[in-house]
Amino acid sequence: MKRPENTVMFPEGYVETDAIDLQKDKKKAAVINGVAAAVMAAMTIPALIIKRSELAALFEGNGIIIHLLILIVSALVYIVGHEAVHAVFFKIFCPKAKLKCGFTLLYAFMAGDAYYNKPCYIIIGLAPIVVFGILFTVLLFLLPEYFFVIWLLQSMNVSGAAGDIYVSVKLAKGPYDLLVYDRGVSMSVFYK
């Protein structure tokens, strides 16, 4: 059986069989956001305890202000970068797709107006956590004086990918020939 191609045209013989909408499904969104908050806490609290002497040293002089400013700017750059990585992979897998970027109250999103097969869509979804996971890990070794800034960014990366991970796991359980049409915070799943 051949895996379906990524396409901007609706493929013949497919029917919408599922939808994922984290804007409308408040219960599921609350669970995913709760998991994200728990992951953020699980990554951040131990680091604060283990590195408490280094944290205390930041409060001497202007260290904390400088670190906070760097964190705020870096977090904004990271959010844009996360969506840009999605965009790159949307385009790699379907160059004709038109991209749409946006923000809701809870989410930043990137969407490609094409039908993506299962492995491509899972790669699109998980690419930012992998790319930034590697980048932040390297930066932890290169810039140890900014450990807290980088670690908080890494915590954002892992916890912020909770929705992407949820969708990827759900799709991984689906049939071989499924297609996904992503609208940003909602998507339709099609089977033959």
Image (cartoon, grey):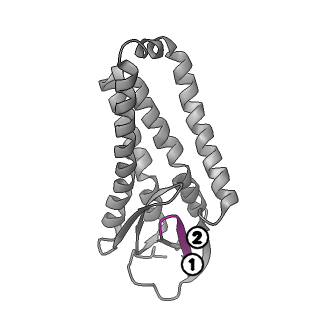
Work out whether residue 113 or residue 68 is closer to the camera in this orientation and state it: 68
Across and down, in percent, residue 24 comes to 63, 66
Residue 175 among magenta residues: no
Please report the residue visible at 67 percent of the width from the left and 51 percent of the height from the top. 31
The number of callouts visible is 2
User: In the rendering, at what x and y percent does residue 58 appear?
Assistant: 41, 16
* Residue 175 seen by the camera: yes
Main secondary structure of the magenta stretch? strand
Q: Is residue 137 visible?
A: no
Residue 120: which quarter of the image?
Answer: bottom left
Work out whether 125 lies above or below 111: above
Q: Residue at x 31, y 64 (%)?
A: 92
> Mark 1 sits on what residue?
191
As for residue 189 lying within the magenta part, the answer is yes
Residue 16 locus on image (x, y percent): 58, 80
Q: Is residue 76 above or below residue 153?
A: below
The residue depicted at 30 percent of the width and 25 percent of the height is 142
Provide residue 39's location: percent of width, then percent of height. Answer: 59, 38
Spatial CA span between label 2 and label 1: 8 Å
Which amino acid, mark 2?
Pro
Amino acid on which disc 1 is placed:
Tyr
Q: Which residues are magenta?
A: 183-192
Q: Say what secondary structure mark 2 lies in.
A: loop
State the residue position of label 2: 175
Left or right position of 166 against 80: right
Do tag 2 and tag 1 residues touch (Cβ < 8 Å)?
yes
- Quadrant where the C terminus sits is bottom right
